[in-house]
Image (cartoon, helix red, strand yellow):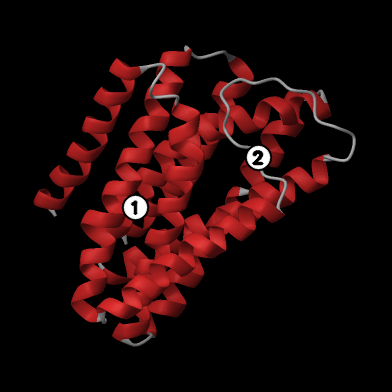
């Protein structure tokens, strides 16, 4: 039960902190770039050092390979279809009229579902794995929500309304978690392994397509490299402790 409360706390904390930071201050760019690189490193580490090895223990190699590419493909389609704002840090572009608040919220909310699913599937296999995934996603939610809430605030012109809208989308991540944990934990080992790999595909796409470009590692090489090393080290350390 304590692990479950910790998971729910982690689901809420990343996006909530990101929204608060985005509205109350302008964090240093190096801090934001570093946090994005750290989150990308941690999510890739979780995917390839934890999720995929766990999946290979309970399902076939070919099924793992298939669902890894399926997860990446699904996120590619979602990313191209929905009006999701990439976390280009503190870029205060004025959205066009067509990019309304309603469409922005839909994009944010539906991007949260796969993240919740990844946490739920990991938690269904091992609570420690679910907590590790939740930590990685919370780490990327902070800088991402800082970037998302800036144009949203430009649209609404109201701090409280913008904060409520962004934090309300967390419920979709919670829905993904509930489905991943309570539905898939009763499934066969092959389906659970496939779901783990699907989650790895989601996280791999988010890391490579969104987080790494936004971290601008080549322009901030020292901060980027340190953050990447720390991210991998955290995954390895938590794996050893688990």
Q: In this rendering, would 218 be left or right of 21?
A: left
Q: Earlier in the sequence, mark 1 or mark 2?
A: 1
Residue 122 at x, y = what percent?
33, 64
Residue 225 at x, y = what percent?
27, 25
Residue 149 at x, y = what percent?
66, 30
Question: Which one is nearer the viewer's eye here, 1 or 225?
Answer: 225
Which numbered disc covers residue 85? Answer: none
Question: Which one is nearer the viewer's eye here, 63 or 99?
Answer: 63
**Relative height, residue 74 to residue 149 (above, below):** below
Question: Which one is nearer the viewer's eye here, 222 or 184?
Answer: 222
Residue under numbered circle 1: 133
In front: label 1 or label 2: 1
Residue lying furthest left = 240
Residue under numbered circle 2: 166
Q: Quadrant of residue 140?
A: top left
From where the camera sits, is residue 14 visible? Answer: no
Which residue is depicted at the point 37% across and 37% down? 39
């Amino acid at each position: 039960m304590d692990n479950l409360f910790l998971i729910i706390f982690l689901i809420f904390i990343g996006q909530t902190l990101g929204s608060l930071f985005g509205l109350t201050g302008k964090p240093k760019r190096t801090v934001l770039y570093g946090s994005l690189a750290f989150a990308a490193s941690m999510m890739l580490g979780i995917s390839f050092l934890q999720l995929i090895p766990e999946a290979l223990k309970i399902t076939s190699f070919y099924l793992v390979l298939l669902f890894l590419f399926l997860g990446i493909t699904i996120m590619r389609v979602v990313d191209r279809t929905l009006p999701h704002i990439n976390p280009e840090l503190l870029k205060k572009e004025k959205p066009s009229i067509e990019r309304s608040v309603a469409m922005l919220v839909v994009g944010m909310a539906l991007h949260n579902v796969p993240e919740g699913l990844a946490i739920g599937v990991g938690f269904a296999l091992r609570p420690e794995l679910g907590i590790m995934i939740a930590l990685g996603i919370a780490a990327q939610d902070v800088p991402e929500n800082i970037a998302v809430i800036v144009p949203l605030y430009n649209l609404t012109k109201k701090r409280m309304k913008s904060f409520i809208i962004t934090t309300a989308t967390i419920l979709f991540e919670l829905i993904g978690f509930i489905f991943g944990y309570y539905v898939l934990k009763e499934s066969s080992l092959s389906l659970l392994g496939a779901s783990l790999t699907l989650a790895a595909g989601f996280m791999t796409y988010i890391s490579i397509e969104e987080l790494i470009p936004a971290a601008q590692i080549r322009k901030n090489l020292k901060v980027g490299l340190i953050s990447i090393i720390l991210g991998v080290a955290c995954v390895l350390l938590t794996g050893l402790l688990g």
